[in-house]
Image (cartoon, helix red, strand yellow):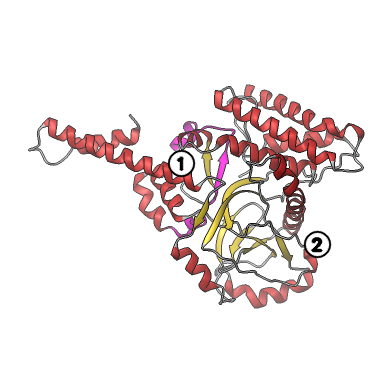
Amino acid sequence: MSAHLREISENSVASNDTELSEDARLARATEEMLAVTDAATQDQDILRRTLSVHSVISSSLSFAERMQRAKWFQSAALVVIGRGTCGTVFEIPGTKSAYKKGSDKHSLWNDANLTNIACRAVTETKTSLQEIFPNVSIPRVPEVTGWISQNDLENWWLQNLSRFPDDTQTGYIFQVQRILPLPKPSREALIRLYFPKKLRRSAYQDPDNKACLVRPYLGQRRGEWEFSSPVLSLQNFPLYLDQIEELQLEATQFSEEMAVGLAIIHWRAFLDGMDMEFVLGSATADGELPTVVENFKTVKPFETPAGDFKRRQVHLWMLDFDKADQLNLKESWKSCCDKMVTAVTANDPYFPNPAATGTLEHKLWDTFEHAYLLAASNLLHIQRGLPKKANKYPALFLKAWEKKATELAKDTEGNFVEFG
């Protein structure tokens, strides 16, 4: 019996109604436990449906109407929907766009520039890879649509600072496609299943939790720390392998899609992927990938396209490339391989862990390995000007990854390092 069910049972038996017989009190406790079990099953069903990458969501009227109304108010207040080491992300209400603001010009520019490269790589290879992986939804990368140049920066802030929260400091800024949140039923189900009971009401009411994205962690199960210190925000909510298994989500599908996504990052965008993230979020159901801007430094700041928010589709997204670096395979394969291995082993545990020993873990790694090699082979086949041995690099990388993962597993608990 779960701790949660035990808690309800104990509370029920400790009823103030002392006139009830022991059998009656136990019967009441059993009824309440069954009610909780039914509710938990319903929440699991909700998440199984809404966290599927094949899901098309009919948005709640409140979300869709709020977005539709905001279309007509270009001066609408901006709301924080995400924070990271590189910068803060602000929703542009009524549009499919967001602003990302940071104080470190180099990091923010690296993020904008490499996100653009990654987005282009996905756009250019989606059709061919979809033929090879017909049952896979190719992971998306947000489209970067503008960067405020140094000459325009001061004037732009004079015109727009009033739209930002009162404590906002000016800084460097770019415009990017917004990853829309998961729907309200998903948010409420996550809160009911994984938040402490005494904090659920405040979590329902916390506006920050409307910006709900989920990080699928295929490489780690919850341990003592995760159970004793549960995450209390739905922004970038971590969903560990045991939770994915408990919810009967498509773990092998996630593994396959991550493998294809990482292959695109490595062998089309030629990035090491350092500290990149994978999240489950949604997008307006337009049915097409975005058109990549050729040179977003030349785009006037800013055009903010509106969208139809009534129907959205769930996708796996790749984002945050501020710490990533470009790979130069012509110079040194060893240097490139070392960077790639560090990127996958020193990040949050998105990918299957090749050193893990569980049955599901083995299955996920086998799925990942097969999909990664197949995607990489097809991507390298259409590349020109690479070293003759380049077709061997993907397998060499996976072998080096397995070796590093085995070494890490022997150190203390073998946990992945988190950047924070």
Name the residue: 78% across, 29% down. 395
Quarter of the rendering occupied by the N terminus: top left
Q: Residue 180 appears in which quarter of the rendering?
A: bottom right
149 lies left or right of 410 = right
- Disc nearest the viewer among 1 and 2: 2
Magenta stretch contains residue 386:
no
36 lies left or right of 125 = left
Name the residue: 82% across, 42% down. 327
| Disc 1 element | loop
Q: Residues within 10 Å of mark 2 (few under 14, many from 20)?
A: few
Magenta segment range? 206-228
Q: Position of residue 372 (x, y in %)?
A: 72, 35
Name the residue: 59% across, 57% down. 283
**Residue 415, labelled with which disc?**
none
Q: In the figure, 254 relative to 82: above or below?
A: above
Q: In the figure, 53 relative to 172: above or below?
A: above
Q: Which residue is mark 1?
A: 230
Q: Residue 176 appears in which quarter of the rendering?
A: bottom right
6 lies left or right of 295 = left
**Mark with earlier residue (1, 2):** 1
Give the spatial CA distance, label 1 vs label 2.
Answer: 43 Å
Q: Position of residue 106 (x, y in %)?
A: 76, 56
Name the residue: 72% across, 51% down. 322
Q: Residue 377 appears in which quarter of the rendering?
A: top right
Residue 285 or residue 213, whichever sits in front: 285
Q: Residues within 10 Å of mark 1 (few under 14, many from 20)?
A: few
| Disc 2 element | loop
**Residue 294, labelled with which disc?**
2
Q: Are marks 1 and 2 in contact (CB under 8 Å)?
A: no
Q: Position of residue 410 (x, y in %)?
A: 63, 21
Q: Position of residue 141 (x, y in %)?
A: 68, 52
Q: Amino acid at mark 2?
A: Glu
